Image (cartoon, rainbow, N blue to C red):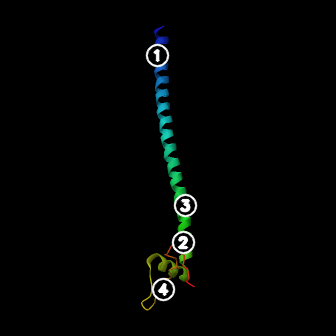
Amino acid sequence: MWKKVLFFSFGVLVFSLLFVEGNSLWQDKKKVQAQYDQMAAEVLRAEKEKAQLSTDLEYLSIPENFEKEIRSRFNFHFKDEKTIIVVPITSTSSAPISSSD
């Protein structure tokens, strides 16, 4: 009789320990899955950035495009180069112009 009680108690103890350990492993799996998803999103973002940088590098490897970008971004001009700024003509007066006869 005591053997059966002792055996049953031991079985319950082992089952309880396995349940607690299994639950702990399940929680760890969820944490690792969340980290994996986060890293996968970061890798996808990095791949998109790499593709954009490759496109920019290919575009800027052409000397004419490189010069155009330097001029537009940094207001670059050569020493003897002159710049003309064109401003559109707009009417500043709100009264119509009338002619006298």
Marks 4 and 2 in Cβ contact (< 8 Å): no
Real-space CA distance between mark 4 and mark 2, rounded to the nearest whole angstrom: 29 Å
Q: In the rendered image, which residue does mark 4 sit on?
A: 84
Real-space CA distance between mark 3 and mark 2, rounded to the nearest whole angstrom: 14 Å
Marks 1 and 3 in Cβ contact (< 8 Å): no
Q: In the image, is residue 58 above or below residue 78?
A: above
Q: Residues within 10 Å of mark 4 (few under 14, many from 20)?
A: few
Real-space CA distance between mark 1 and mark 3, rounded to the nearest whole angstrom: 56 Å
Q: Residues within 10 Å of mark 3 (few under 14, many from 20)?
A: few
Q: Residues within 10 Å of mark 1 (few under 14, many from 20)?
A: few
What amino acid type should be assigned to the residue bearing mark 3? Glu
Q: Residue at point 43% right, 92% down?
A: 80
Of marks 1 and 3, the one in the foreground: 3
Real-space CA distance between mark 1 and mark 4, rounded to the nearest whole angstrom: 95 Å
What amino acid type should be assigned to the residue bearing mark 4? Ile
Q: In the rendered image, which residue does mark 3 sit on?
A: 47
What amino acid type should be assigned to the residue bearing mark 2? Asp
